[in-house]
Amino acid sequence: MLPGSDGAPPVPGSPSEPGVPGPPAGPGVAPPFAAPPTEGRRARLWLGLGVGALAVLLCCGGGGAAIVGLAVTNAQAIDEQGRAVTDDYYQALVEKDWSRAYDKLCDDVQRQESRPEFEQRVASEPQISGYRVGRVDTQTLTVPVDVTLTGGGRETQQVTLKSDQQTGGMEVCGVS
């Protein structure tokens, strides 16, 4: 007996209706293709991994570069401040402005020697007629100064620097 011959309407998608495909096959039926399409899958995977690696590199590399930049800038600032305070100290000694030279000394040295004692001691030492300030050793906070004394004598003095806790600036904390 054919569908629809018993008086019932035909079932949609049944073979009795021309041009209409049948219902999808049930479990266990082979799909119309052998495997899912893989075109471009590897390219997308490597592209994603590359973008991820670039993001990690930028984040980590940028942080590393910032740390290096801060260290270099800090070393340059210490060198600049150390040279400036040493230059001011020796310029005051050349000009025989003992009071200004005393002001460049750190608090520890000023506690050990009063201004009048410092002025008397420095006035009695061989006078400085010229000097050249070297580069600050940022590890030891020392700076060499080539000194020319009145009378033509020359010597190299080692200046020890210290950071002032209140101002953050550098101060002369010893000369040897």
Image (spheres, rainbow, N blue to C red):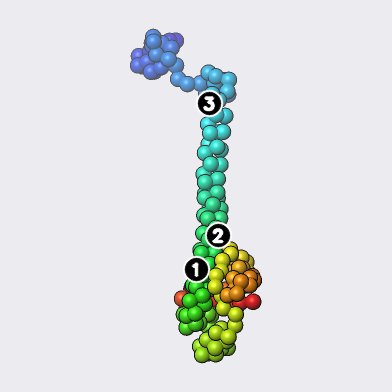
User: Callout 2: helix, strand or loop?
Assistant: helix
Q: What residue do we see at 55% from left, 59% from top?
A: 71
Q: Residues within 10 Å of mark 3 (few under 14, many from 20)?
A: few
Q: Amino acid at mark 1?
A: Ala
Residue, disc 1: 84
**Residue that badge 3 annotates:** 40
Image position, residue 55 (x, y; %): 51, 44
Percent position (x, y) of residue 147?
59, 70
Query: Counting residues from the N terminus, which is met first, the one under dot 2 or under dot 3?
Result: 3
Badge nearest the viewer, 2 or 3: 2
Q: Nearer the viewer, residue 60 or 119?
A: 119
Q: Secondary structure at mark 1?
A: helix
* Dots 2, 3 in contact, CB < 8 A: no
Which one is nearer the viewer's eye here, 40 or 118?
118
Q: Is residue 31 above or below residue 99?
A: above
Q: Is residue 169 placed above or below 37 in the rendered structure?
A: below
User: Which residue matches tag 2?
Assistant: 71
| Residue 165 visible to the viewer | no
Quarter of the image for the N terminus: give it: top left
Residue 173 placement: quadrant: bottom right
Determine the CA span between mark 2 and mark 3.
46 Å
- Residue at image coords 60%, 68%: 146
Quarter of the figure with the C terminus: bottom right
Amino acid residing under circle 2: Ala
C-alpha gap between disc 1 and disc 3: 64 Å
Give me the residue at 51% from left, 64% from top. Answer: 80
Q: In this rendering, which labeled residue sits more in front, label 1 or label 3?
A: 1
Nearer-N-terminus badge (1/3): 3
Q: Residue at x 43, y 12 (%)?
A: 15
